[in-house]
Amino acid sequence: MTIAVAPGAVELHHIVKQFSADGPIVLDDVSLSVKPGEFVSLVGASGCGKSTLLNILAGLESPTSGVVNLAGPPALMFQEAALMPWLTAGKNVELALGLGGVPRVQRKARAQELLELVHLENSYDQRPHELSGGMRQRVAIARALAQSRSVLLMDEPFAALDAITRDFLHEELSRIWKETGITIIFVTHNVREAVRLSERVLLMSSRPGRFIKEWEIGSNEPWRSDSTFSSYVSELAGEITDNLRREIVRHAS
């Protein structure tokens, strides 16, 4: 199934964030341009401002100064699935469809299509406690897509999952991204995850947060499916991790 999404992009210009007038600067002169349909990951030490930046993009926080340009409001997905426990998987997706203005008579069919997209076509009537952690996260992805937004913000959505489930969801997310053409900005502490999923990885400095280095990975499908890609992921993840460690040491000294 292909979901039609409006073309979208993200533009940040000289974003500064302080939570109080006399407080520390959390984000300092952050600028970013994300092309429509691009998958970009943000990595950095804990407390560097990654989640704050995502919250600004989501409209949950306002920048102290700077300009944010988005093609409409984005969808946001957190580390926890945050499903309504009294609703089935299908009804959780229908809830998002209803908030998006989809007529009631169309919601069940649309919700079923979205669950099929995340390979949960048989889970419409299951409640969250009947689903595994990975399945709940796939419902959360379906719910995010139900909002029909052109930009999806993901804040460490797989951090709490075991390695096998996380690897499976990496493949699922890559497939969904390719099928929908949605723009994704992905925050993670897992450097290998960032390299495996993204077309571009940006490293943030410790506070105040700013972008200090960028790696272009691209999305050449034959190359990504080749056996050499796994070794490339390991090599590039090692390089990014070395840069991250140097930044952590610099900040601590």
Image (cartoon, rainbow, N blue to C red):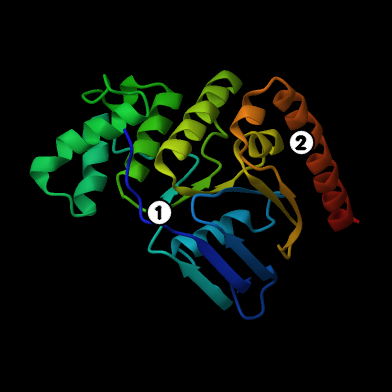
- In front here: 143 or 18? 143
**Residue 175 in the image: above or below residue 227:** below
Marks counted in the figure total 2
Amino acid at the residue labelled 2: Ala
Q: Nearer the viewer, mark 1 or mark 2?
A: 1
Label 2 packing within 10 angstroms: few (<14), some (14-19), many (20+) = some
Q: Which residue is mark 1?
A: 150
Looking at the rendered structure, the kind of residue marked 1 is Ser
Dot 2 lies on which element? helix
Residue drawn at the location 40% of the way across and 54% of the way down: 150
Q: Nearer the viewer, residue 181 or 16?
A: 181
Does residue 12 appear left or right of residue 58 in this picture? right
The x, y position of residue 235, in whole percent, is 81, 32
Which residue corresponds to the image point at 45% horizontal and 60% vertical from the top-left?
58
Which residue is identified by label 2?
237
**Residue 208: x, y in percent?**
73, 65
Residue 194 lies in quadrant: top right
Secondary element type, mark 1: loop
Point out residue 182 in the picture as x, y percentages from the top left corner.
44, 47
First reached walking from the N terminus: tag 1 or tag 2: 1
